[in-house]
Amino acid sequence: MSDLPPFYVITVNYHSASYLPDFIASLAPLPFLNRMIIINHSPEESLGALSAPFPLEIIDQENAGYGAGLNRGLREIPQQNAIALLCNPDLVLATPAKVAEALAFMAGQPRVGCLIPRSVDFQGQPILACRTFYTWKSLLAARIGLFRRVFAGPYREHLLLDAPGDRPLEVDWGYGAAMFYRVAAFGGGPAFDENFFLYMEDVDLCVRLWQAGLAVVSYPELLFRHHSQKDSHRRWRFLRYHLVSLGKFIWKYHGLPQRRHPGTKIF
């Protein structure tokens, strides 16, 4: 597998240490994993007891947000041709045999800046990780149940429910819980806009990838199980983070950005 690009995993820990052993164990079958980098935003959680069959680097830093943590990890990667899995710590890789295929796909498709795997929760229910960019109708439907009936068509389109789900497909954006990211996408610079403390940094990243002429691709053969917590739907503090980030996003783009040429490509 020497022809694969260098591969790294970067995750941000914030009161999630209990998930890390299972995540590390699921990565163990990957002999080509160069290093796992854990940015620890809750230093009161000791991660020193973690062990892995691959190099493990733990960096403690003040919590400046999810995107800032991933940017910090990206600075540890020396190779410009590397691919990094940028992800939450509460994952389990369900299809390790498909990771090499995904890396080879990205190596052979230099226009792909980011690859989004398929995700399910631990009850096996699909997590719709790939979406179209928000319109006002789909945004209202995503946040308020009443509007899911009023704008059922735009919401269905937003969720890509009628798109082919069995092959790589260009999409507008994918959830930041798991993203295979081309380190050289922005000339090796930061991936995320650190003005977004939490939420919308993944949408913003995908907007900027498309603006840079790179594609975001759904890759359904690669599967993760995710302890999806949906904090912004249940806890006021996280809802506030989401609303603040949404406001920053709309301010940054003077509205809700769309792809100029949103044709769908099946690879």
Image (tube, rainbow, N blue to C red):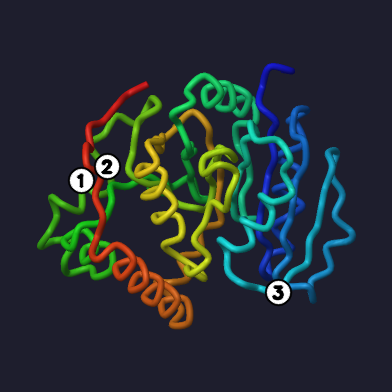
Residue designated by label 1: 157
101 in relation to 223, above or below: above
Q: Are the residues tagged 1 and 2 within 8 Å (C-beta)?
A: yes
State which quadrant residue 211 falls in.
top left
Q: Which label number is shown at residue 160?
A: 2
State which quadrant residue 98 falls in.
top right
Quadrant into which the N terminus falls: top right
Rendering coords of residue 223 (x, y %): 53, 36
Residue type at tag 2? Leu
Q: Check the image and name the residue furthest to the bottom.
A: 236
State which quadrant residue 30 falls in.
top right
Q: Residue at x 78, y 28 (%)?
A: 31
182 in relation to 246, above or below: above
Q: Are the residues tagged 3 and 2 within 8 Å (C-beta)?
A: no
Q: Which label number is shown at residue 260?
A: none
Q: Which label number is shown at residue 62?
A: 3
218 in relation to 154, above or below: above
Compare marks 1 and 3 and give the one earlier in the sequence: 3
State the SS at label 1: helix
Q: Left or right: where does residue 47 sit relative to residue 37? A: right
Rendering coords of residue 148 (x, y %): 18, 61
Q: CA distance from mark 3 to mark 2?
A: 37 Å
Q: Residue at x 41, y 34 (%)?
A: 217
Rendering coords of residue 171 (x, y %): 33, 39
State the SS at label 3: loop
